[in-house]
Amino acid sequence: MSNMVDVTLGGRSYRLSVAAGQETKVKSLATHVDALLSDLRSADPLMDRDRQLVLACIQLAAESLEARDQLDEQGASVVQFHRALALKLEQLLPQ
């Protein structure tokens, strides 16, 4: 089942169909994209809309990659911690 959500991006309103329960998430994401577009518009008021959208997409992709890299680093740290803990436990256990 889907629901309709109204969002504003770059000064234009859009009605989107979203999965039930995803309304708040989609509105939050749209607010983030709209803020990126607003920042781009403020930096260069003469920039055309297509260029604003492309740059916003690139910024979002960069944020996504950075978040994925951080998650990968945290995962590697957890694995390393577990290996070190297992080694210490093995040393403490009687043979």
Image: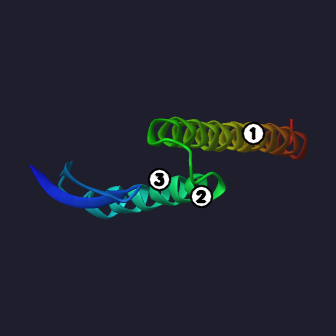
Q: How far is disc 2 from disc 3 in space, using C-alphas?
A: 10 Å
Q: In the rendered view, does 17 fall on the left or right side of 33?
A: left
CB within 8 Å, label 1 to label 2: no
The amino acid marked with disc number 1 is Glu
The kind of residue on which mark 3 rests is: Val
Query: What colour scheme does the image use?
Result: rainbow
Local packing at callout 3 (Cα closer than 10 Å; few below 14, some 14-19, many 20+) is: many
Residue linked to disc 1? 73
Expressed as whole percent of the image width and height from the top left, the position of residue 95 reads: 86, 35
Per the image, the residue denoted by label 2 is 39
| Rendering coords of residue 49 (x, y %) | 45, 42
Pick the front one: 54 or 2? 54
Residue that mark 3 sits on: 33
* In this view, 3 is above or below 64: below
Taking the spot 9% from the left edge, 49% from the top edge, the residue there is: 1
Work out whether mark 2 precedes mark 3 in sequence or the reverse, and give the earlier one.
Answer: 3
Residue at figure coordinates x 51%, y 53% from the top left:
37
- State the image quarter where residue 20 is shown: bottom left
Front: mark 1 or 2: 2
User: Can you tell which quarter of the image residue 93 is in?
Assistant: top right
Q: Return the residue nearer the eye: 44 or 18.
A: 44
Mark 2 is surrounded, within 10 Å at the Cα level, by few (under 14), some (14 to 19) or many (20 or more) other residues, namely some
